[in-house]
Amino acid sequence: ASRAINNQGNIFKSPFDDVEIPHNFLHQEMWNNVDKWWNKIAIVSAVNGRSYSYEELRKLCGRFATSLRRNNLGPGDTLAIILPNIPEYAIASLGASEAGMMMTLISPALTVYEMSQQIIHSEAAAVITTQEIYSMIVDTVRKNPKHLPLIVVPNGNESISTGAINFTDLVSDGIDEFEKIGEQSRIYNENDTVILPYSSGTTGLPKGVELSHRNIIANIVQASHKEYDFDEPAIGEHQEIIPGFLPFYHIYGFVGCLLKNLRIGGKIICVPQFTSNIFLDVLDKNRSTVLYVAPPIVQLMTTDNRFNRKHMECVKCVVSGAAPTGTQLITKLYSKVNLNFHFGQAYGLTETSPMISRSKKSPWDSSGLIAVNTELRIVSEDDDKGGKNLGINETGEIVVKGPQVMKGYYKNPKGTEDCMDGNWFKTGDSGYIDDKGQLFITGRLKELIKVKGLQVAPAELENLIFSHDKVEDVAVIGTPHVKWGEVPKAFVVPKSGIKITEEDIKNYVAQRLSKYKHLHHVEFIDKIPKSAAGKILRKELSKV
Ligand code: 4UW
């Protein structure tokens, strides 16, 4: 790894030689070698066994794309995908890509209010969802815009509401390889946005992250680099078995797990709802070869007595990301199963498609080596050295440049400007690079709270609590939690002379926002500490 510390001007480079990033569209990149695993199962539901072979998947994507285009949806339009991890997720997303659309990924666990915020902000031209969610959202969502087409994926033979468009009908005819037939009247290119997930970035409310075909393909190539993949899949013979435990609406589950493994002919087992029972059941029934996890799952593996060596006998590699996994936890996992798999910590953000670095071996508290084609700077946060690039073993803000860095925030040039320094993206995380070129994450400079690896934006909670008529002022921070990493805590200043309880505030939030954003602690204080410019001094609150 000598090149990693070839840090001229304190710019750290990936230790691996640059590779060519293919010029392609996302869906086409998925089908590069598809004839080699044409008859194999691509994706299957862990709940009801519904599955699609690569042949079926390829054709259904083309047919879905045909339908979208015939309904005048194409480049410049956005499809909102509100689905749990079901096999049709792959058809909806890759079909949208084939039609030249953008897609915004929305968690089906959100409240109707939260979903509609993202639908409106992303200017979605159509929504694809389940019958259950359709019934919840139809009244709210149809108000704006009035005729927003709502597509429903039926569960098996389930009947769907009149007024909804049946997904099965949309894929029942159409053209298998839609893009080859020259109906592409509306042109798009590899630098056009294809995925529009939401992230709060360093500050404020969730923002649409514009990721292009090229961004995503680059990151899939980066994550598939031979230095991280311990066994190259033997094309046509061996098939990777990949449980999809992590939600596909999050960049990690979508790009890191689903897309990366479809491109190499893997078999994805969709887990629509995560519980410890389902987790163990999926591991019992399938000989998984790679596990994509987040720290709470590692926690479960080490503490649940039912989990054992048998569940991991075929596992070559466990990849963990989205939040730090402690060395102790990893050591515990190794001693519990006593097998020789690799444990790789991966680090990155929605804004970087997501991977920036990944570790191969110990030390496990490192987030590993910088991804191929990527450069990194550690920038001083001290006022006197402001903006200076730091050297080996010096801690500062992690700033990255590479083909995986987003185009910018959707309809938000100010937000984009704030986090970009030319082509360099400021992550809002702090860390350092050691003399072996390994990245260590030491903390977060930004407001973001991570609950079970999912983003919670303090600004979203603060805006909501502030709207309570008995609240004068409020600030929200994250506090440590044994199982979930962090949980939100609110500091509330009540209006003078008015009585309000901890329960009032907690319920007010619980009625409006999804569960992982709920407050675990509320503390009443006289005054929120703020800077002269009115910025909340969160560091001072965390000392309270
Ligand atoms: N250690 C410490 C980590 C780590 C971390 C993320 O929700 P987002 O925007 O994005 C993610 C991305 C997860 C991910 C990255 C790389 C990768 O290869 C992969 O697949 C295996 C998944 O969660 O949150 C971004 C923020 O989450 C924190 C950090 O603060 C970052 O800015 N974070 N990974 N290994 N912290």
Image (tube, grey):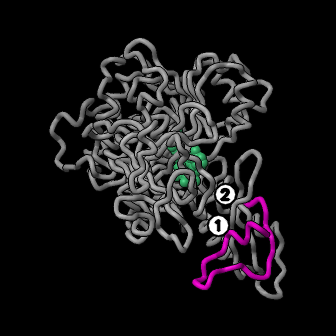
> Height in image: 162 above or below 510?
above
Mark 1 or mark 2, which is nearer the start of the sequence?
1
Is residue 258 visible in the rendered structure shown here? yes
Residue at image location 54% in from the left, 74% down from the top: 384
Is residue 528 within the magenta segment? yes
Residue receiving disc 2: 517
Residue receiving disc 1: 461
Is residue 149 visible in the rendered structure shown here? no
Amino acid type, callout 1: Leu
Residue at image location 67% in from the left, 53% down from the top: 516
Residue 161 lies left or right of residue 333; in this view the side is left
Q: Evaluate if marks 2 and 1 touch, with contact meaning CB atoms under 8 Å apart.
A: yes
Question: Cα distance, mark 2 to mark 1?
Answer: 8 Å
Is residue 311 within the magenta segment? no
Residue at image location 66% in from the left, 76% down from the top: 466
Residue 255 lies left or right of residue 511; in this view the side is left
Amino acid type, callout 2: Lys
> Height in image: 255 above or below 495?
above
Q: What stretch is highlighted in magenta?
A: 519-544
Q: Residue 244: x, y in percent?
A: 55, 32
